Image (tube, grey):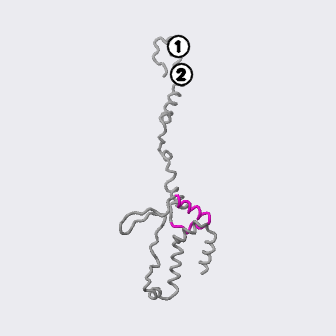
């Protein structure tokens, strides 16, 4: 009983947006504890079902994550998640601010999932891996070769000047720099 009082006190501090979410999609841990308290009131787990046999209610329906797309069991059609990625991120931020992020269902927007993916895949920016190059613009791709060509020309400049002086200022000169 103290668990329910604790949850009631926690619910008073939550913003309405989180309250609406938890009212519509109660956390799995809470819904399983509620169903277990209903069944543990008697020594026979089926006693309350026999008493209310005309009201055959499934106490543990299949839990569907509102953050993931689901497949319809009959038609096989995929249905979009109830909450978009943007709304998921907003809910996660709200829950994190109020310390109840553990009660949310699994989502790719959860901080622990984001850090796990960051560690698994890294930055995933082209050109940051070993042996990779960024495509870049034409001048960026060719600048290294051009600078090397310039450097080599500067190193060969004294020899070129000497040859120029020997041949006589342009007569018979074929190696004009480009």
In percent of width and height, residue 131 lies at: 47, 44
The quarter of the rendered structure image containing the N terminus is: bottom right
Circle 2 residue: 157
- Which residue is found at the position 62% from the left and 78% from the top? 5
In percent of width and height, residue 141 lies at: 48, 36
Range of magenta residues? 86-105
Closer to the chain start, of discs 1 and 2, is 2
- State left or right for residue 74 relative to residue 32: left
Camera-side residue: 132 or 96?
96
In percent of width and height, residue 95 lies at: 58, 65
Magenta: main secondary structure: helix
Numbered label tally:
2
Camera-side residue: 94 or 171?
94
- Which residue is found at the position 49% from the left and 88% from the top? 43
Q: Is residue 105 above or below residue 120?
A: below
Circle 1 residue: 165
């Amino acid at each position: 009983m103290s668990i329910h009082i604790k949850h009631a006190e926690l619910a008073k501090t939550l913003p309405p947006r989180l309250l609406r979410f938890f009212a519509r999609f109660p956390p799995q841990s809470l819904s399983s504890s509620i169903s277990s308290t209903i069944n543990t009131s008697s020594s026979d787990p089926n006693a309350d079902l026999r008493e209310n046999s005309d009201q055959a209610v499934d106490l543990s329906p299949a839990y569907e994550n509102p953050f993931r797309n689901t497949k319809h069991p009959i038609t096989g059609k995929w249905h979009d998640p109830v909450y978009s990625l943007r709304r998921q991120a907003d809910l996660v931020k709200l829950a994190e601010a109020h310390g109840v992020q553990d009660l949310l269902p699994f989502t790719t927007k959860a901080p622990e999932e984001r850090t796990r993916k960051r560690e698994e895949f890294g930055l995933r920016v082209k050109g940051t891996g070993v042996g990779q190059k960024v495509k870049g613009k034409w001048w960026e791709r060719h600048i290294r070769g051009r600078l090397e060509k310039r450097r080599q020309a500067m190193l060969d400049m004294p020899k070129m000047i000497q040859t120029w002086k020997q041949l006589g200022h342009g007569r018979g000169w074929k190696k004009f720099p480009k």
